[in-house]
Image (cartoon, rainbow, N blue to C red):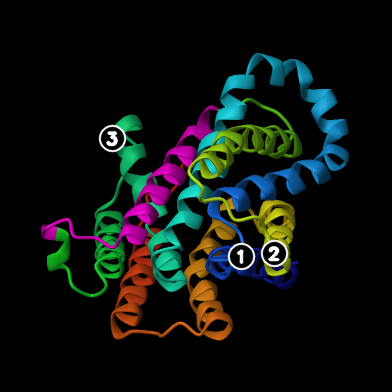
Amino acid sequence: MNVQAYIILCITTLIWGGNSVAGKLAVGHVSPMMLTGMRWVIACSVLLAFAAPQVRRDWPVIRKNWALLLGYGLVGFTGFNAFLYSALQFTSAINCVIEQAGIPMVIFVVNFLLFRTKVSPAQIAGFTLTLFGVALTASHGDLTTLLTLDLNQGDALMMAAVLVYAAYTVALRFKPEIHWKSLIAISAFGALLSSIPLVGWEIATDRMIWPDMTGWVIVAYAGLLPSLVSQILYVRGVELIGPNRAGLFINTIPIFGMVLSILLIGEALQTFHIIAMGLVLGGIAVAERGRPKDPA
């Protein structure tokens, strides 16, 4: 069971790591908002059949909480991916996957500030290391640029993506008790609705790039694998070994993303990337090992 779970969860995070690489490969083949919108057209089309029974069963609860559920799609699905794909127009995929590792740190800070979640000294130390790793990546190895707020536009957009996804994750504590398929389906529909104005903005500002053959392959990948397959696999992984152990595999996303960026895109691995990755993963490990124990 453990081996099966490990394989499933590694495939899951490999797919998620590939999302940033796909966004980088999309540059010049499909515009960011068009990619975001078409991704959710595909996902919703599949979910229409895949999750229909659960949505019908949960409909009374969905109707009472429709604004929140659609909001999850707006913020966590459309917002995050719109910022991510836009960031990749200006910065490397390696930078983006390392910067994504800052999401747990932001979640930790927000939960502490808003809900006074317990915090240990080891967690503070661990997330401080992670912060330095993300800052080193965002500044391209020169932390002095942060003092003048002279960030690459892409890295600044990626920081916004990190904040958006952290907000989405924290807000999930308020989700109603419905089947996970219903949650994904309604959130994906919210993502589709909220992506329409963004595509309209691209068209109005003459920035829209209709997908070419390469673009359609990327759209299909984003719509099927990160949006659907990885979600299903992650749920199965959690069922096999529990959420705490399964959650640790999310920390492998930067590793897979970095390897894929080098192999598929040919991006150069810089010394600051290696140092930053060590800080990020080391910080997460320290924070996990030193987290307050759940009461029995």
Looking at this view, is 83 or 208 the one in front?
Answer: 208
For label 1, the crowd category at 10 Å Cα-Cα, with few meaning under 14, some 14 to 19 and many 20 or more, is: some
The amino acid type of the residue labelled 1 equals His
- Spatial distance from mark 1 to mark 2, Cα to Cα? 6 Å
What span is in magenta?
Answer: 147-174
Residue 137 location, quadrant: bottom left
Q: Where residue 186 sits in the image (x, y, percent)?
A: 70, 32
For label 3, the crowd category at 10 Å Cα-Cα, with few meaning under 14, some 14 to 19 and many 20 or more, is: few
Looking at this view, is 50 or 281 the one in front?
Answer: 50
Q: Which mark is residue 212?
A: 2
User: Label 3, on which residue?
Assistant: 113
The amino acid type of the residue labelled 3 equals Leu
Q: Where residue 44 sits in the image (x, y, percent)?
A: 76, 41
Residue 195 location, quadrant: top right
User: Label 1, on which residue?
Assistant: 29
Looking at this view, is 189 or 51 the one in front?
Answer: 189
Q: What residue is rendered at 59% in x and 21% in y? A: 67
Label 1: element kind = loop
Q: Earlier in the sequence, mark 3 or mark 2?
A: 3
Q: Which mark is residue 60?
A: none
